[in-house]
Amino acid sequence: MAQTSINIRMDEELKKQAEYLFSEFGMNMTTAFTIFAKAVVREREEYLLRFRRTQMISITNTTKTALKRLWLILKQVKELLTS
């Protein structure tokens, strides 16, 4: 498999902490990010499903809130028209 290089910008202190932590696990930054990338690619369907589910819940809650507000406005309009 062909190898490629990437550059990552991050806070210097975060980099030091990450390198220390990864070394505790016996790996370097390259190995740690490779493991992360492989896990994301392998689990992408699960991540996408979870993301879509979260979006749908958010849309549903927003719609419910909007409908409740609309209902209150319509009640107020009705009261104004009947008084």
Image (cartoon, rainbow, N blue to C red):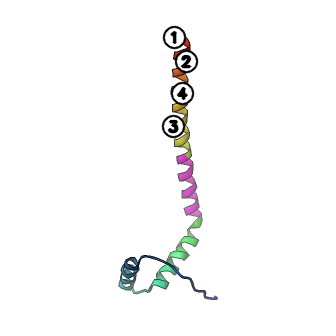
Q: Is residue 55 left or right of residue 23?
A: right
**Can you say which quadrant of the picture contains the N terminus?**
bottom right
Mark 1 vs mark 3: give the one in front.
1
Q: Residue at x 57, y 48 (%)?
A: 56
Q: Nearer the viewer, mark 2 or mark 3?
A: 2
Q: Which residue corresponds to mark 1? A: 83
| Closer-to-camera residue (52/83) | 83
Q: Which residue is mark 2?
A: 78
At label 3, the amino acid type is Thr
Q: CA distance from mark 4 to mark 2?
A: 10 Å
Whether label 4 touches label 2, CB < 8 Å = no
Q: Which residue is mark 3?
A: 65
Please state which amino acid type lies under the numbered disc 1.
Ser
Q: Going from the N terminus, do you reach mark 4 or mark 1 first?
A: 4
- Answer with mark 4 or mark 2, whichever residue precedes in sequence: 4
Seen at 64% across and 88% down, the residue is 2
Magenta extent: 45-58
